Image (cartoon, grey):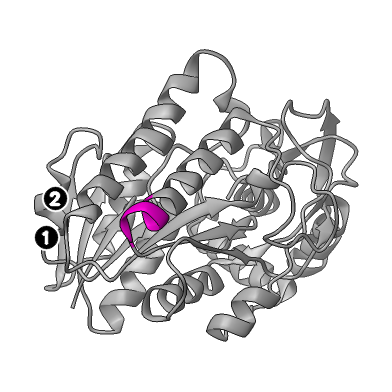
């Protein structure tokens, strides 16, 4: 069985590919190796996918011959995209249009004429909700993104639903609520938190720290992807994938202090444009239809993330005067 994973060199994509290989899939990974963060980290993720059943294709979905790359695939896991709320404003918005909307449309066009594809699983985001109208937020809640990033994720999600209803493309979209765990992107909050704890660096919090997030451990995200691919649902279905651990930034820092046994140096700055105060996803739909539920508690997940940071950063020089920015943006 061949599974295609786009964005395979990223945090979630590489973790998903490893699990698929362990389950006996042949995996074809695609990634453009963009410069959003250090490409060396992406190549390091690829090195961990050294397996006879893994094939890597470097390139942009906007220019690759996608149809040939998916011609023998059963499942497609579309993890590729341009991340980040803060950077999506201004001149960089064009990149988000190309990476999040244009690339998705080209992939859907290829799926439309590829009969072997049984499922395309799209990595959407809780950012599509913006300031949600209620909590826990259901899939039937209004979608009102507060950032250009969220707008592009919602547009791509709509494309998945449109290709499902008009052409029968078997899509399912998963709205991730802030994903964390070992190997998380360096710009994401938890990695900045744990790195700061290990290296005695300063953590910058944007806002008062009372903002609330629903955090989801990466292995739970991976499980949801595979269950969505292998399960049965109406084409165009949308599911929330949330950890059920809605807590404030300050509560997370308290937890990290307990895990690390260290005092953390924290500085507050102005809230980031496009940020939201609270996220929290209802997961009854995916639980009822696919049997998925989160398995990893926030405490256990944060402990694993910290242990990974200890192994990854402990040999770096201490820099007590440097600053580690830690945004609690509503990114995937």
Position of residue 327 relative to residue 76, above or below, is above
Q: Residue at x 37, y 29 (%)?
A: 98
Q: Is residue 268 visible?
A: yes
Residue 52 at x, y = what percent? Answer: 11, 73
Residue 299 at x, y = what percent? Answer: 74, 73
Q: Say which of 16 and 327 sits in front.
A: 16
Q: Quadrant of residue 247?
A: bottom right
Position of residue 300 relative to residue 11, above or below, is below
Q: Quadrant of residue 145?
A: top right
Does residue 188 belong to the magenta stretch?
no
State left or right for residue 181 relative to residue 245: left
CA–CA distance in space, label 2 to label 1: 6 Å
Q: Judging from the image, what secondary structure is the residue with disc 1 in?
A: loop
Position of residue 181 relative to residue 25, above or below, is above
User: Which residue in the protein does label 1 denote?
Assistant: 71
Q: Which residues are magenta?
A: 163-169
Q: Judging from the image, what secondary structure is the residue with disc 2 in?
A: helix
Badge 2 vs badge 1, beta-carbon distance below 8 Å: yes
> In the current view of this chain or complex, which residue is farthest to the top?
91
Residue 132: numbered disc:
none
Q: Residue at x 29, y 82 (%)?
A: 22
State left or right for residue 198 relative to residue 116: right
Q: Residue at x 73, y 41 (%)?
A: 130
Mark 1 packing: few (<14 Cα in 10 Å), some, or many (20+)?
some
Q: Say which of 276 and 40 sits in front.
A: 276
Secondary structure predominantly adopted by residues drawn in magenta: helix
Q: Quadrant of the N terminus?
A: bottom left
Q: Quadrant of residue 167?
A: bottom left
User: Which residue in the protein does label 2 denote?
Assistant: 67
């Amino acid at each position: 069985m061949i599974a295609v994973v786009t964005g395979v060199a990223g945090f979630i994509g590489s973790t998903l590919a490893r699990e698929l290989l362990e389950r006996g899939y042949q995996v074809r990974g695609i990634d453009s190796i963009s410069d959003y963060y250090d490409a060396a980290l992406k190549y390091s993720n690829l090195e961990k996918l050294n397996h006879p059943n893994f094939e890597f294709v470097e390139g942009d979905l906007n220019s690759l011959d996608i149809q040939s790359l998916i011609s023998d695939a059963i499942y497609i896991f579309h993890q590729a995209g341009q991340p980040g709320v803060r950077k999506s404003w201004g001149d960089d918005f064009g990149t988000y249009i190309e990476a999040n909307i244009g690339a998705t449309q080209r992939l859907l066009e290829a799926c439309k004429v590829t009969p072997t594809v049984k499922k395309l699983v799209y990595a959407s985001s809780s950012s599509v909700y913006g300031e949600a109208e209620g909590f826990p937020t259901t899939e039937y809640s209004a979608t009102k993104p507060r950032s250009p990033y969220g707008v592009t994720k919602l547009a791509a999600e709509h494309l998945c639903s449109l290709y499902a209803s008009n052409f029968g493309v078997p899509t399912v979209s998963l709205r991730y609520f802030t994903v964390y765990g070992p190997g998380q992107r360096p710009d994401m909050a938890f990695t900045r938190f744990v790195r700061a704890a290990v290296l005695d660096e300063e953590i910058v919090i944007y806002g008062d720290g009372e903002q609330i997030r629903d955090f989801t451990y990466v292995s739970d995200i991976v499980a949801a992807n595979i269950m969505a691919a292998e399960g049965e649902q109406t084409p165009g279905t949308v599911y929330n994938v949330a950890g059920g651990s809605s807590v404030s930034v300050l509560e997370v820092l308290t937890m990290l202090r307990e895990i690390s046994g260290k005092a953390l140096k924290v500085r507050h700055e102005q809230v980031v444009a496009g940020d939201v105060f609270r996220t929290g996803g209802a997961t009854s739909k995916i639980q009822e239809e696919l049997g998925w539920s989160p398995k990893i508690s926030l405490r256990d997940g944060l402990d694993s993330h910290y242990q990974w940071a200890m192994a990854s950063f402990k040999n770096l020089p201490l820099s007590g005067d440097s600053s580690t920015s830690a945004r609690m943006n509503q990114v995937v």
